[in-house]
Amino acid sequence: LARNPGEREFHQAVTEVFESLGPVLERNPQYVDAAVLERLCEPERQIIFRVPWVDDAGHVRINRGFRVEFNSALGPYKGGLRFHPSVYLGIVKFLGFEQVFKNSLTGMPIGGGKGGSDFDPRGRSAGEVMRFCQSFMTELYRHIGEYTDVPAGDIGVGGREIGWLFGQYKRITNRYESGVITGKGVTWGGSLVRTEATGYGTVLFAQRMLATRGLSFDGMRVAVSGSGNVAIHAIEKAQALGGHVVACSDSLGYVVDEAGIDLEVLRQVREVERLPVAEYAKRRGGAHYVPAARVWQVDAQVALPCATQNELDETDAKRLVESGLLALAEGANMPLTPEAVALLQSAGVLYAPGKAANAGGVATSALEMQQNASRDAWSFEHTEERLASIMARIHDNCAETAEEYGDPGNYVLGANITGFTKVADAMLALGVV
Ligand code: NDP
C-alpha cells in the first residue's frame, strides 16, 4: 500500500485476489520462494504521456495518456483502452491487474495490460474525438505491436475509436499490422462476434452457472446496468435465452420497461444517436425513467452489472437479495464492492466475478488475432461456437478448482486460483525476469 499511495481501486483488486490464494500458496511453497506475488503486483512497465489536441473552437487541450504493461508471462500484453474523466493510474492498474488473471483463464496465449486517458468523449464532436485518438496513438504507437502489446476498446472506446487509432498507427508506421489492435471493423481485419462477445459471454457464463442449480434464463426477471457495448449485448443474449429484461441504465439514471426492453429502440437511442438512456423512456410508451439513481432499485432474479467499477454496494446487494435475487454475473470489471460480494455469497446467491464472466471479450480478441495471423476470416457461427466453448471451459475450470479447494460454488476462489496458477507456473519457468 505504501508503495502505491492513493491507488484505491488497485488496492481493492489486489486484496480481492490475494485473499483467495492462501490455500494454493500452502500447497506450492515454490511460488513464495520465487516472490511470485510481489512480482505479480508490480507492472513490468508503466507509460504515462501527454496527449495534446485542438478542440473545435481552436483551443489547445491537454489530457493524460496511460498504458500499463502488467505481465507478459503468457503472451503479449493484451487489454483495452478506456477514455473516461475518472481515469488515473489507480484505475488503469486495477484493470491491468485483473486482466492478467482473466487472460490466463481464457486459456489463450495472452499477457495482461490496460490503458486509456482522462479524456471525456461526452459532448465532443466526431472531429474532436478523431484528433484526440490520432494524438493518443502518435505517442502510443512506439510501445505496441503484434508481438509486444495489443490494445482494444473499453469504456468510451468502441469500433469508431479503434478505427481512428488503427488508422493513425498504420499511417505512422506504414505497416498494415492488423494484429496490433483488436475490435476492428469486420471489413478491415476485425472478427465477427467481437462486438457482441463480452455481453454474450457474460450471459453464457451465467446460463451455465444457473444450470448448476437446475435453473435457466427462461422466464427470469433480469436487470442490467449500463447501456453501452457490454450491456446491450448482454440484454440481447439474455432475451434470446428467454430472459425478461426489464431495466437498464447509464451514468445519469435508469429506465424500467415492464413490457421488456425494446432493443431496437435502445440501440437507436444509445448507439446511433448517442443520447442518454432517458430518451428511451420518452420513445417507449409504458417505460419510465428514474434520474440520478441506480438500477438496483428494480426487483430482479438475475442481475448483470455491465457499467463500471464499484457501481453496486452492500445496500444495493441487500435490497436485491430481499427482492429474490438468484444469480449475478459481472459484465463490467469489479462492479461490486467487496462488502456486496460478501453479502451475496453469504446469502447463497450464485455470483460470477468479472474476470471469469466477462472474459469472452478478450478471448474473442485473441480469436481476432488468430484470424489476422492466418489472414483468414471466420463465419459468425464458427466464432460464436468458439466463444461458447471457451465460456463453458472457463466456467467448468473455475467450478472444478473451487471444488478441489473445498469450497464448491465459490467462483471467486475458483477464478483467482485457476488464473493465478497458470501465470505463476509460467513465471517460474521463465526465471527471475
Ligand atoms: P461503454 O462505454 O460502451 O458503456 C459504458 C456504460 O456504462 C454506459 O452506459 C455508461 O453510461 C455507463 N457508465 C460508465 N461510467 C459510469 C459511471 N461512472 N457510473 C454509471 N454508469 C457509468 O463501455 P463497455 O460497455 O465497453 O464497458 C462496460 C464495462 O465492461 C466496463 O467495466 C469495462 O471495463 C467492462 N468490459 C468491457 C469489455 C469490452 O469488450 N468492451 C470487455 C470486458 C469488460 P454513460 O454513457 O452515461 O457514461
Image: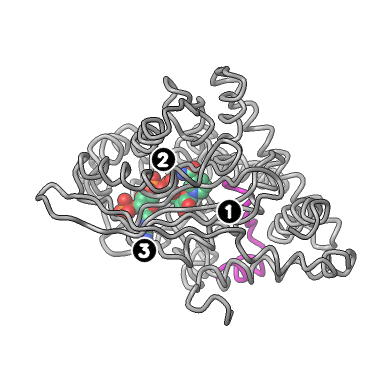
The residue singled out by tag 1 in the image is 354
Amino acid type of the residue that numbered disc 3 sits on in the rendered structure:
Ser
Q: Residues within 10 Å of mark 3 (few under 14, many from 20)?
A: few
The residue singled out by tag 3 in the image is 86
For residue 375, side relative to residue 35 (left or right): left
Instruction: Give the vertical position of 151 relative to 324 (above or below).
Output: above
Amino acid type of the residue that numbered disc 1 sits on in the rendered structure:
Gly
Mark 1 CB near ligand 1 (8 Å cut): yes
Q: Quadrant of residue 179?
A: top right
Upstream in the sequence, badge 1 or badge 2? Answer: 2
> Magenta region: which residues?
340-358
Mark 2 CB near ligand 1 (8 Å cut): yes
Image position, residue 17 (x, y; %): 67, 65
Count of numbered labels shown in the rendering: 3
Q: Residues within 10 Å of mark 1 (few under 14, many from 20)?
A: many
Upstream in the sequence, badge 2 or badge 3? Answer: 3
Mark 3 CB near ligand 1 (8 Å cut): yes
Q: Secondary structure at mark 1?
A: helix
